[in-house]
Amino acid sequence: MARIRILLTCLAAGLVLAAFPQASDSSEVRLNHYSFTLGTGWTHYVDNLENGNGDITKDFIGVSLKFFWEPEYRLSLGLETGYYKLFRTTHQFGDTVAHADRNVVPLLLLVRMRIIDNFHLGAGMGLAFVQNKLSGVGDEVVTKTNSLANFQLSASYLYPVGRMFRVGGEAKAFHFAAMDDWMYSLQALVAVRF
């Protein structure tokens, strides 16, 4: 019984020493970093319309901008914004051609965690500013909606190129609560870490 206690104590001490590096380690690692990330790529809008989807274009190029504070080795906290066109449709009514678009600008608080080397999983929640525009029938009509309970899930790979730069890609899914719709995105990323 005493041997088991000694063995368990040694095992626990070894795990603690392995899990928390000491200040006297030979490698100097700065834990507090910041980064800016610019992303652009394909977006696809998934709506909840049951019919009338035949004339809607839902694939566009979107742009995102992220700022991260990296206070420790694995965790990053940040903000994201961007510009995404969700859909565009054109209909002809006699001699008149009508165009309708929907654009969104999200403003999200993000939490990102490095899972393995250069691979991150993230989640975010926040606001989205939705703009609907109808043109072609008289004056242009613009409506704006604020969507409050939105969330995002993402997976990204950022490969270091030099000391400050990283390049990679990201797959993410947005849910817009005001419309109960989804948007998926695949983006190429360029990050500057300082």
Image (tube, rainbow, N blue to C red):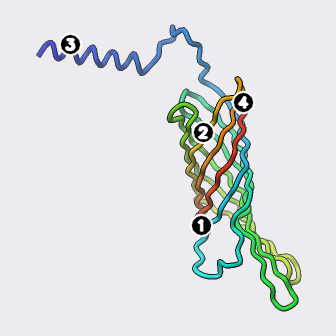
Pointer 4 with pointer 3, Cβ within 8 A: no
Whole-number angstrom distance, CA of label 2 to CA of label 3: 43 Å
Whole-number angstrom distance, CA of label 4 to CA of label 1: 34 Å
Position in image of residue 130 (x %, y %): 71, 64
* Among the two numbered marks 4 and 3 on one chain, the one whose residue lies closer to the N terminus: 3
Name the mark nearer the viewer: 4 or 3: 4
In which quadrant of the rendered view does residue 28 lie?
A: top right
Residue name at image x 73 percent, y 68 percent: 102
Whole-number angstrom distance, CA of label 2 to CA of label 1: 26 Å
Identify the residue position indicated by label 2 in the image: 157
Q: Secondary structure at mark 1?
A: strand
Which mark, by number, is residue 165? 4
The residue carrying pointer 4 sits among few (fewer than 14), some (14 to 19) or many (20 or more) residues within 10 Å by Cα, namely: some
Identify the residue position indicated by label 1 in the image: 181
Whole-number angstrom distance, CA of label 3 to CA of label 1: 58 Å
The residue type indicated by label 4 comes to: Phe
Pointer 3 with pointer 1, Cβ within 8 A: no
In which quadrant of the rendered view does residue 157 lie?
A: top right
Identify the residue position indicated by label 3 in the image: 6
In which quadrant of the rendered view does residue 133 lie?
A: bottom right
The residue type indicated by label 3 comes to: Ile
The residue type indicated by label 1 comes to: Asp
* Among the two numbered marks 4 and 1 on one chain, the one whose residue lies closer to the N terminus: 4
Hey, which residue is sitting farthest bottom in the picture?
A: 94
The residue type indicated by label 2 comes to: Tyr
* Among the two numbered marks 2 and 3 on one chain, the one whose residue lies closer to the N terminus: 3
Asked if residue 98 is positioned above or below residue 18 in the image, the reply reads below
